[in-house]
Amino acid sequence: MDAGWIRPAISNHVDNAPRHSHGDIHISAATHDGNLGLTIADEGPGCPADFLPTAFGRFARAEASYTSPGSGLGLGLAFVAASHGGSAPAENTEHGDAVTLDIPF
């Protein structure tokens, strides 16, 4: 893994989470099948379900976030994960949303 890319990708989402959360932010890491899964979950309203498939598109933002600063949800996470042969899925949970940086090591 290239720490020069991984650190900013993680920081991007960790910095973004408090802006949209109404509670705690949970960060967890686990290895599985030769991959590292790093999940950042918040206790916010989540994302509109129709936004999730395009959440990592270039400059993608959910309509409700247009009034807050930023250029798009975690674009860096998706790029870094893909460049390492992994993925960065986003999902709504019962408490908010969660993004996982899932990359092989």
Image (tube, rainbow, N blue to C red):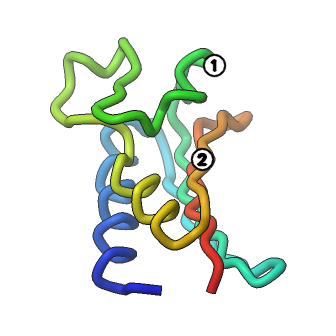
Crowding around mark 1 (Cα neighbors within 10 Å: few <14, some 14 to 19, many 20+) is few
Looking at the rendered structure, the secondary structure element under dot 2 is strand
Above or below 84: residue 21:
above
What residue is shown at x 45% (from left), y 39% (from top)? 56
Q: Residue furthest left?
A: 69
What residue is shown at x 42% (from left), y 64% (from top)? 80
Mark nearer the viewer, 2 or 1: 1
Find out whether the residues at labels 2 and 1 contact each other: C-beta distance under 8 Å.
no
Residue 13 placement, left or right of 30: left
Q: Quadrant of residue 37?
A: bottom right
What residue is shown at x 28% (from left), y 82% (from top)? 4
For this rendering, which residue is in front, 27 or 90? 90
Crowding around mark 2 (Cα neighbors within 10 Å: few <14, some 14 to 19, many 20+) is many
**Which label's residue is closer to the chain start, 2 or 1?**
1
Above or below 72: residue 49:
above
- Marking on residue 14: none
What residue is shown at x 53% (from left), y 46% (from top)? 42
- Residue kind at label 2, given as amino acid type: Ala
In the rendered image, which quarter contains the C terminus? bottom right
- Residue kind at label 1, given as amino acid type: Ala
Using the numbered discs, state the Cα–Cα distance from disc 2 to disc 1 in whole angstroms: 13 Å
How many marks overall? 2
Looking at the rendered structure, the secondary structure element under dot 1 is loop
- Marking on residue 49: 1
For this rendering, which residue is in front, 25 or 99? 99
Residue 48 place in picture, x, y as percent:
56, 18
Which residue, given by chain and number where applicable, does mark 2 sit on? Answer: 98
Residue 24 placement, left or right of 2: right
Residue 9 place in picture, x, y as percent:
36, 64
For this rendering, which residue is in front, 100 or 45? 100
Residue 55 place in picture, x, y as percent:
48, 32
Q: Quadrant of residue 21?
A: top left
